[in-house]
Amino acid sequence: MMALTLLTALGGALVLGTVTETAIAASYREGTETFYAAEAAVELVIEELAAASDWDAIAAGDAPSAFVDGPPAGIRRVGAVTLDLAVATEDVATAAGDKDVDAYLLYAHGRLVDMIPGGTARSPHYVAVWIAGLATADAEEVSIMRIVGRAYGPTGSRRSVVVSVTRPPGSEDSLRVMSWHELR
């Protein structure tokens, strides 16, 4: 009887360890997928900015992105999570902590599957990208664009990427990435 109790306890501990490790691996996998979704959204916006001739209009909100799923405020459902874009915009401004930026503008947002041509992906992630235009001391127009891309996973994971880009002098259709880092 004592041996049976000991083996039952040992079996229970092994099952608990296996279940815990499986949950940790699933959480890590979703976090990684969420990070890559945020990077993909930022890459999309960088392509749009490279093709745009007037960054001042984009920074002012007069030239919207082609990737939007509705008004830039409101509630979105992402799996089991509710996302309020207005609250997310305030959170991005606080988390980025940029002293040079007055306000971030929600520029692009939608489901990751809607961003990918062909619709073969089955990702439940939601992505949003905020931008802020910065003028350097020697220029009156926007010469640096700060981009914050954030992806939201179906079980509450959230990852953000911050990128600063500039257009090299004399270049019409290329950008130079000045910095790229994950926002924690």
Image (tube, grey):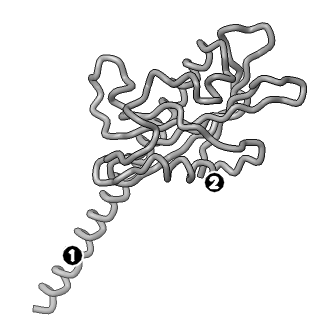
Within 10 Å of disc 2 (Cα), the crowding (few <14, some 14-19, many 20+) is few
Please give the name of the residue rendered at 42% of the width and 50% of the height, measured from the top-left corner: 84
Q: Which mark is residue 64?
A: none
* Towards the viewer: 48 or 72: 72
Q: Earlier in the sequence, mark 2 or mark 1?
A: 1
Determine whether the residue tagged by mark 2 lies in a helix, strand or loop: helix
Between the residue at mark 2 and the residue at mark 1, the CA separation in whole angstroms equals: 45 Å
- Left or right placement of residue 1 versus residue 152 in this view: left
* Towards the viewer: 19 or 69: 69
Please give the name of the residue rendered at 62% of the width and 49% of the height, measured from the top-left corner: 93
Whether residue 168 is situated above or below residue 127 in the rendered picture: above
Whether residue 71 is situated above or below residue 49 in the rendered picture: below
Percent position (x, y) of residue 129? 52, 36
Q: Which mark is residue 12?
A: 1
Residue identified by numbered label 2:
94
Residue at the limit of the structure toward the front, as seen here: 62
Q: Nearer the viewer, mark 2 or mark 1?
A: 2
* Towards the viewer: 78 or 124: 78
Amino acid on which disc 2 is placed:
Thr
Determine whether the residue tagged by mark 1 lies in a helix, strand or loop: helix
Residue at the limit of the structure toward the left, as seen here: 1
Q: Are marks 2 and 1 in contact (CB under 8 Å)?
A: no
Number of marks present in the image shown = 2
Percent position (x, y) of residue 99? 77, 48
Percent position (x, y) of residue 86? 49, 48
